[in-house]
Image (cartoon, grey):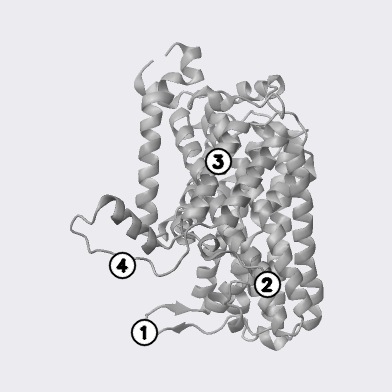
C-alpha cells in the first residue's frame, strides 16, 4: 500500500453501520430526551447568562436578538449536516468518525485530535467561569475562600515563576507578584467531580444532567415569564442603535455592522449539540433519535436565547447590561432581588451541564481514537464494573482540573473556537461529497437543500475563523504538529485498518 493510500484509507459506511449492532462496548441507556438534554446542556451556558447582555451593551443594542438569529442560522446549517451523519453513521466519535468514513484516516485523525483539545479546553473554561458564580454565592453567605484558592495565577505571575525556574536569558526581569492567587480550587474540583460522575455510570450522569438542564431551563423560563410583565417597549427604540465610532480607539459599535459583530461573538454560544453525537453507541435508538436530538436541542436553545434577549433589553436600557452577571443585574435594577438570586443559583446549577456535555464528548472521542488503533489500545478498555471509558475520562478530569486551576481564563479561551469551526467546515464539506459518491445510501434524515445549506455553513465558519486572533493560529498549529508526530510515529502503523489490510 502506498503512503498516500494509507492516509486516505477509510471504513465504508456499510462497515460502520454493521459494527453498530455487533459492538457491545457500551450499554444503550440514553433515550431521546436524555440525548436532547446533553445537547441543550452543551449549548446553553454563559451565552444566555452573560453574552446576551454584554453584546447588547457593546455591539447590537436591543437587536442582539437578531444577532442570535443570524448566528443560529449559521449554526443550524452545520446542525442539519450533523443530523444526516448521525442518522447514517450512529457510532461514537462524532465528526471524527464521519471524517473517517468519507475523507480517510489522516483527516479523521486531525479532526479527532483537534476536537479532543477543544472539548477539554471548553471544560476548563466553563469550570473557571462556574467557579466565579459559586464564589459570588458563597460571598453573599459570608463564606470566603483563602486568597490563594480563589483564582488561578495571573499571566504575569506565571511568567514570574517561569523566569525563576529557567532564568531571564536577556529578557526583562518580571517583578514578584503582588496578589496571592495561586490555584482555582473550585474550578479544579468541579472538573474532577464531573469526570468521576461520568466514570461511574453513564445513565447516572445522564439523569443528573437531565435534572440540571431542567433546572436551567426553568430558570430561563422564569426570566421570560416574569420579565415580560416589566417590559418597557421604549427600551427597544431604536431597535438597532445608530453606528458610533470611539474617537480614542477607532472601534465601532452598533448599527448593522454591530449586529453582525454580535453574531460572530454569540456564534460560540450556539453550538454544543455536536457533543450528543459522541454518545451514539449509548443511545437506545441511535439512527432515529440522534438526528431528532441534534435539531431539537438547537431549536429549544434558540427560542430561549431570543426570548431572553428581548426580555433583557425590554426591562432595562441595553447600556446597563455590560456586567458579568447581566441577567441577574437586569432584575436587580428593577427591584426584583429575589429573582436575581434565583437566576444566579440557576446559572451555577445549569452551567454544570455544559461541563458534563463536553467532558462526555472528549472522553468518547479519545476512546474512539484508541479503539481504531490511532492511540494505544489501553485507552479503549471499558470499565467492566461501570461500562464506561473510565481511563480517558479520569485522565481528562485531572488534565482539565490542572488547566482550570492554574491558567487564567483568557489564556485557555483563546484556543477553544478554532477547532470546532474547523470541524464544522469538514462536516459540511463531507456531507456534500458523500451525496455525490454514495447517493444510493439509505438516509434516515436528509439535510434539506444540501447544496445551499452546507456551503452556507462552510462560509459562516470560515468567516469566523478568519476573525480569530493570530495567537490562536500559532497555538493551534503547535497542537496539530504534535498530533502529526503522534500519527506518523504511532497511529499510521497501529491503525486497525493497517492491520486488516496488511499495510
Question: Of callouts 4 and 1, which one flags the residue occurring earlier in the amino acid sequence?
Answer: 4
The mark lying in front, picked from 2 and 1, is 2
Find the residue positioned furthest to the bottom: 234
Question: Of callouts 2 and 1, which one flags the residue occurring earlier in the amino acid sequence?
Answer: 2
Q: Residue at x 66, y 78 (%)?
A: 329
Q: Give x and y (percent) for residue 107.
A: 45, 34
Question: Label 4, on which residue?
Answer: 175
Question: Of callouts 3 and 1, which one flags the residue occurring earlier in the amino acid sequence?
Answer: 1
Q: Is residue 273 visible?
A: no
Marks 2/3: CA distance? 33 Å
Q: Give x and y (percent) for residue 66.
A: 62, 70
Question: Label 2, on which residue?
Answer: 142
Q: Give x and y (percent) for residue 181.
A: 48, 63
Find the residue positioned furthest to the top: 502
**How many numbered discs, if any?**
4
Question: Label 1, on which residue?
Answer: 248
Amino acid at each position: 500500500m502506498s503512503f498516500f493510500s494509507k492516509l486516505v484509507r477509510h471504513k465504508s459506511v456499510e462497515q460502520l453501520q454493521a459494527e453498530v449492532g455487533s459492538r457491545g462496548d457500551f450499554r444503550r441507556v440514553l433515550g431521546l430526551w436524555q440525548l436532547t438534554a446533553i445537547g441543550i446542556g452543551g449549548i446553553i451556558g454563559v451565552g444566555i447568562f452573560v453574552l446576551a447582555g454584554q453584546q447588547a451593551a457593546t455591539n447590537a443594542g436591543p437587536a442582539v436578538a437578531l444577532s442570535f438569529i443570524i448566528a443560529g442560522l449559521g449554526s443550524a446549517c452545520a446542525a442539519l449536516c450533523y443530523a444526516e451523519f448521525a442518522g447514517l453513521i450512529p457510532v461514537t466519535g462524532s465528526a471524527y468518525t464521519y471524517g473517517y468514513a468519507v475523507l480517510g484516516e489522516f483527516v479523521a485523525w486531525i479532526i479527532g485530535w483537534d476536537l479532543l483539545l477543544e472539548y477539554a479546553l471548553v471544560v476548563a473554561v466553563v469550570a473557571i467561569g462556574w467557579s466565579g458564580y459559586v464564589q459570588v454565592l458563597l460571598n453573599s453567605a459570608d463564606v470566603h475562600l483563602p486568597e490563594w484558592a480563589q483564582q488561578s495565577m495571573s499571566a504575569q505571575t506565571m511568567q514570574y515563576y517561569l523566569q525563576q525556574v529557567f532564568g531571564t536569558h536577556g529578557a526583562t526581569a518580571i517583578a514578584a507578584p503582588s496578589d496571592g492567587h495561586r490555584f482555582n480550587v473550585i474550578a479544579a474540583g468541579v472538573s474532577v467531580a464531573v469526570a468521576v460522575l461520568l466514570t461511574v455510570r453513564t445513565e447516572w450522569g445522564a439523569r443528573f444532567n437531565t435534572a440540571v438542564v431542567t433546572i436551567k431551563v426553568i430558570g430561563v423560563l422564569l426570566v421570560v415569564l416574569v420579565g415580560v410583565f416589566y417590559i418597557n417597549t421604549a427600551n427597544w427604540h431604536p431597535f438597532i442603535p445608530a453606528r458610533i465610532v470611539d474617537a480614542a480607539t477607532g472601534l465601532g459599535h452598533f448599527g448593522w455592522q454591530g449586529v453582525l459583530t454580535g453574531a460572530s461573538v454569540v456564534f460560540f454560544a450556539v453550538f454544543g449539540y455536536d457533543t450528543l453525537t459522541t454518545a451514539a453507541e449509548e443511545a437506545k435508538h441511535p439512527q432515529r433519535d440522534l438526528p431528532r436530538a441534534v435539531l431539537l436541542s438547537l431549536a429549544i436553545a434558540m427560542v430561549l436565547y431570543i426570548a431572553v434577549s428581548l426580555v433583557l433589553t425590554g426591562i432595562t436600557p441595553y447600556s446597563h447590561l455590560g456586567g458579568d452577571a447581566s441577567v441577574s443585574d437586569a432584575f436587580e435594577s428593577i427591584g426584583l432581588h429575589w429573582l436575581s438570586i434565583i437566576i444566579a443559583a440557576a446559572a451555577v446549577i445549569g452551567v454544570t451541564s455544559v461541563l458534563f456535555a463536553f467532558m462526555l464528548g472528549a472522553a468518547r472521542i479519545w476512546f474512539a481514537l484508541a479503539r481504531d488503533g490511532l492511540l494505544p489500545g489501553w485507552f479503549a478498555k471499558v470499565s467492566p464494573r461501570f461500562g464506561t471509558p473510565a481511563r480517558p475520562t479520569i485522565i481528562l478530569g485531572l488534565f482539565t482540573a490542572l488547566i482550570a486551576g492554574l491558567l487564567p481564563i483568557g489564556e485557555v479561551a483563546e484556543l477553544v473556537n478554532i477547532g470546532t469551526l474547523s470541524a464544522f467546515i469538514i462536516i459540511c464539506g463531507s456531507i456534500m461529497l458523500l451525496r455525490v459518491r454514495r447517493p444510493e445510501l439509505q438516509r434516515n434524515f436528509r439535510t434539506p437543500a444540501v447544496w445551499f445549506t452546507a456551503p452556507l455553513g462552510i462560509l459562516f465558519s470560515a468567516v469566523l475563523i478568519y476573525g480569530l486572533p493570530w495567537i490562536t493560529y500559532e497555538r493551534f498549529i503547535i497542537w496539530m504538529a504534535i498530533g502529526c508526530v503522534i500519527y506518523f510515529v504511532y497511529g499510521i502503523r497501529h491503525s486497525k485498518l493497517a492491520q486488516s489490510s496488511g499495510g
